[in-house]
């Protein structure tokens, strides 16, 4: 039992001291350099706690920086130079992020697809749905079905364009990546791109990246018992790369099977071979991450990035956040397909966003095309389904320093919903809409 009971955060708040957070930080750094020895991380963490107890004056509360300094010292002292380097780099990156922006959701300007963004804004203005008030006007005039038709047509045009770009490179493309952050609509877009290519005689073979998860016991947990599935290191990247190389060499591979009920990976489970004129199609959160395909020639790859690039200005002069739209989408999907309470999704979202900013967003400008999956009519539907939850969370987590991230998101969405009318029915949403991936009732199986 440690003598330490409290720790001071950077914002000055004091929260319970949790040694497991040190273990997780060390383990995460180890995973980043290829290690997965949880017991070693626990032993190193115990040394950190012992060192803190030794150097800390009686009755003094350690702060985050002090703890991190001791972690670095213990790692180096134990000959864990590579782990220490990964830890230091991660710590430095987080410090730079804090210095650059006060808002943790702001995307670095160099990674914004400006041309696509201006196209979406132009469309929104032309259809008079670029403000919360104009959206309400569509709702109150009964014009939402027409707006839905126009929105779906714009999305379909993006998908058609992506398919045509692939066809233009039909002689060299071997693998198509549908990439993007969580709940951006990758699965539906993958299906639709596949349908269009199939009409042109292409045979598409899907490689399900979810089956490459490491065993659940290999993932670090936080003090709330929450696993981080969002990091690329949750996947066996080396095996994905190896299997793709072998497939393109004409070999048969046996891909693993991941049992989500048990959290176990079954190796060498499903046989797979590519025939002539077949293209690998991958719908993956980390499709842009270099390590996944480091041995595949770049000209063999086609990269599609998808994001709900909604351009809707609110009364405070700010725009509705894309990450908030995806958070609500994931809440609905998690509740429907994983039996998760929306609260669980909210409390897990900081992992999602952190991983996106580190492992997805930096590669946006390396892609071949961008698809906008935002539908202006989706927010009124989400308010009807989730609005009361956000009001409750905004109150429940207001003064909880351990739930600061959850409170900020809940409060922001709650304030946005206060100026948007709710729409109780989703009957006007087409059965093949990307929105059906999250609200259900569609023709596709997910």
Image: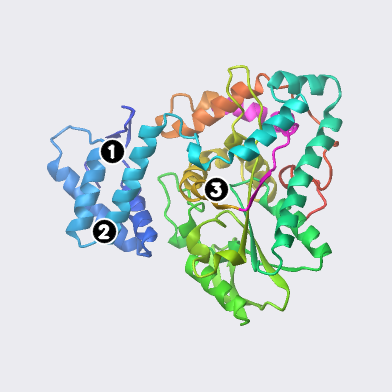
Mark 3 closeness class: few <14, some 14–19, many ≥20 residues within 10 Å: some
Tell me the tag on residue 373: none
Left of 128 or right of it: where is 258? Answer: left
In the image, residue 114 above or below residue 282? above
Mark 2 closeness class: few <14, some 14–19, many ≥20 residues within 10 Å: few
Residue 306 seen anywhere in this rendered image of the structure:
yes
**Residue that label 2 marks:** 43
Instruction: Using the image as rendered, state which of residue 377 and residue 424 is in the foreground.
Output: 377
Residue 431 on image: x %, y %: 84, 46
In the image, residue 406 above or below residue 432? above
Say which label, 3 or 2, has the lower sequence index.
Answer: 2
Q: Secondary structure at mark 2?
A: helix
In the image, residue 179 above or below residue 394? below
What secondary structure characterizes most of the magenta part? helix
Residue at screen point 65% across, 68% down = 172
Say which label, 2 or 1, has the lower sequence index.
Answer: 2
In magenta segment, residue 68: no
- What segment is highlighted magenta in the picture? 368-393
Say which label, 3 or 1, has the lower sequence index.
Answer: 1
Q: Are marks 3 and 2 in contact (CB under 8 Å)?
A: no
In magenta segment, residue 375: yes
Hey, which quadrant is residue 251 in on the image?
bottom right
In the image, residue 44 above or below residue 211? above
In whole angstroms, how far apart are the C-alphas of marks 3 and 2? Answer: 41 Å
**Residue that label 3 marks:** 365
Q: Secondary structure at mark 3?
A: helix
**Residue that label 1 marks:** 64
Q: Are marks 2 and 1 in contact (CB under 8 Å)?
A: no
Instruction: Using the image as rendered, state which of residue 375 and residue 11 is in the foreground.
Output: 375
Q: Secondary structure at mark 1?
A: helix
């Amino acid at each position: 039992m440690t003598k330490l009971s409290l720790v001071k955060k950077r914002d000055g708040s004091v929260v319970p001291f949790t040694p497991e957070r040190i273990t997780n930080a060390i383990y995460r750094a180890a995973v980043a350099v290829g290690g997965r020895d949880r017991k070693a991380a626990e032993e190193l963490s115990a040394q950190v706690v012992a060192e803190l107890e030794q150097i800390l004056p009686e009755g003094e509360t350690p702060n985050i920086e002090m703890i991190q300094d001791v972690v670095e010292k213990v790692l180096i002292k134990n000959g864990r130079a590579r782990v220490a380097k990964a830890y230091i780099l991660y710590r430095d990156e987080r410090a730079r992020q804090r210095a650059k922006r006060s808002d943790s959701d702001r995307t670095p300007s160099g990674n914004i697809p400006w041309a696509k963004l201006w196209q979406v804004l132009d469309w929104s203005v032309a259809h008079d749905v670029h403000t919360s008030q104009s959206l309400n006007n569509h709702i109150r005039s009964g014009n939402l079905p027409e707006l839905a038709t126009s929105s779906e047509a714009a999305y379909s045009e993006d998908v058609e364009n992506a398919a045509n770009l692939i066809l233009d490179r039909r002689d060299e493309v071997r693998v198509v990546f549908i990439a993007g952050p969580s709940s951006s609509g990758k699965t539906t877009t993958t299906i639709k791109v596949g349908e269009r290519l199939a009409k042109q005689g292409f045979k598409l073979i899907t490689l399900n990246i979810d089956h490459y998860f490491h065993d659940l016991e290999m993932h670090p947990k936080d003090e709330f018992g929450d696993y981080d599935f969002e990091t690329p290191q949750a996947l066996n990247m080396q095996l994905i790369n190896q299997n793709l190389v072998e497939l393109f060499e004409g070999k048969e591979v046996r891909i693993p099977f991941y049992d989500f009920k048990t959290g176990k990976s079954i190796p060498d489970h499903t046989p797979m071979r590519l025939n002539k004129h077949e293209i690998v199609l991958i719908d993956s959160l980390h499709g842009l991450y270099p390590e996944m395909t480091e041995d595949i020639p770049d000209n063999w790859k086609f990269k599609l990035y998808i994001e709900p690039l909604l351009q809707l200005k609110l009364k405070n002069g700010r725009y509705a956040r894309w990450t908030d739209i995806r958070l609500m989408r994931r809440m609905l999907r998690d509740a429907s397909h994983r039996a998760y309470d929306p609260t669980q999704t909210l409390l897990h979202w900081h992992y999602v966003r952190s991983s996106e900013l580190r492992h997805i967003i930096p590669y946006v400008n390396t892609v071949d095309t961008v698809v906008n999956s935002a539908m202006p009519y989706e927010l009124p539907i989400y308010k009807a389904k989730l609005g009361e939850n956000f009001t409750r969370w905004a109150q429940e987590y207001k003064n909880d320093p351990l739930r600061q991230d959850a409170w900020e998101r809940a409060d922001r969405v709650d304030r946005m919903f206060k100026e948007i009318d709710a729409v109780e029915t989703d009957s006007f949403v087409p059965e093949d809409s990307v929105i059906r991936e999250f609200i259900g009732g569609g023709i596709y199986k997910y």
